[in-house]
Image (cartoon, helix red, strand yellow):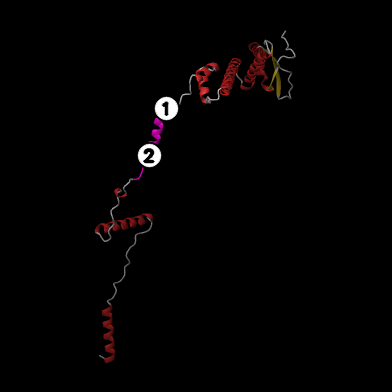
């Protein structure tokens, strides 16, 4: 017969979807029995109804010696039940992942507690010896492996926090950045006369005439290429114009014949 928890024993509960309860129970209750055996907890599933979307599963420890150990066992069992039902993991994988998560959480809590203890020790040292700097007290505690008395002896003996010097890699990176800035923004020459100037253009010279003629030919070619569908222009067939002096002479002769009857 499974022992029942006392009134003061810790008890945990978890809400799980009703349609995945088969993953927790297993075939003929094999999974839930193995879960209870592995975690030292008792898992109680209430009777289910068809209209309930979720089920509150009660978990309590039956092999713990104190309340803290019971809470730890129940939390492990709750997490394994969630991984079984919600993630669909096998029981062995769910147990392994729950243990890994618990270990990571314990490491975070231990680091936080250690940091708080170092802060309190540093504050006690500064209150007793205000002539010391906080950085020196912190370095002394680190050198003495968090031994407060040994850290005080180091400080009284003249120990101080080492001055951090820039590493060689940082110096190289700063030099490379300066070289890049110089390449991107080169400085102007001091003598402006040393800058090469283009040759002057002299109007009327044969060289400039050829240059303008070449430019005009290029522009004509561009115009022709811009309108390739237009027909080429042809000269108009016009009759040669009559000489105006010869025409005036003939008019004068005609008037003389009319006046003199010749």
Q: Which residue is at a point 28% across and 81% down the rendered structure image?
A: 248
Residue 182: assigned label: 2
Indicate the secondary structure of the residue bearing disc 2.
helix
Asked if residue 178 lies in the magenta stretch, the reply is yes
Residue 192: assigned label: none
Task: Check the image and report above or below for 94 versus 188.
Answer: above
Say which quadrant the N terminus sits in. Answer: top right
Viewer-proximal residue, 115 or 231?
A: 115
Q: Which residue is at a point 50% across and 22% down the rendered structure image?
A: 139
Find residue 126 and report its horizontal and vertical position in percent.
Answer: 56, 23
Is tag 1's residue or tag 2's residue first in the polypeptide sequence?
1
Q: How crowded is mark 1: few (under 14 residues within 10 Å), some or many (20 or more)?
A: few
Q: Residues within 10 Å of mark 2 (few under 14, many from 20)?
A: few
What is the number of callouts on the image? 2
Q: Main secondary structure of the magenta part?
A: helix
- Find the magenta span and give its range: 171-188
Residue 167: assigned label: 1
Asked if residue 132 lies in the magenta stretch, the reply is no
Viewer-proximal residue, 220 or 260?
A: 220
Q: Which residue is at a point 29% across and 48% down the rendered structure image?
A: 194
Find residue 131 and report its horizontal and vertical position in percent.
Answer: 53, 25
């Amino acid at each position: 017969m499974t022992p029942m928890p006392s009134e003061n024993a810790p008890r945990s509960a978890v809400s799980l979807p009703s349609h995945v309860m088969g993953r927790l129970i297993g075939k003929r209750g094999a999974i839930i029995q193995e879960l209870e055996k592995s975690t030292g907890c008792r898992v109680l599933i209430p009777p289910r109804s068809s209209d309930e979307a979720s089920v509150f599963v009660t978990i309590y420890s039956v092999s713990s010696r104190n309340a803290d150990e019971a809470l730890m066992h129940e939390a492990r069992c709750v997490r394994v039940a969630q991984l079984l039902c919600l993630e669909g993991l096998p029981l062995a994988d769910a147990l392994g992942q729950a243990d890994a998560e618990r270990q990571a959480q314990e490491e975070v809590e231990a680091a936080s507690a250690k940091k708080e203890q170092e802060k309190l020790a540093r504050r006690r040292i500064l209150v007793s010896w205000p002539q010391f700097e906080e950085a020196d007290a912190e370095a002394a505690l680190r050198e003495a492996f968090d031994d407060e008395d040994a850290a005080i002896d180091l400080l009284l003996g003249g120990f101080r926090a080492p001055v951090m010097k820039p590493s060689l890699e940082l110096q190289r990176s700063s030099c490379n950045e300066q070289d890049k800035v110089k390449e991107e923004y080169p400085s102007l020459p001091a003598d402006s006369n040393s800058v090469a100037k283009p040759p002057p253009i002299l109007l009327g010279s044969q060289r400039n005439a050829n240059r303008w003629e070449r430019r005009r030919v290029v522009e004509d070619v561009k115009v022709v290429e811009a309108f390739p569908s237009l027909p080429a222009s042809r000269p108009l067939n016009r009759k040669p114009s009559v000489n105006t002096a010869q025409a005036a002479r003939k008019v004068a002769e005609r008037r003389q014949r009319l006046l003199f009857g010749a």
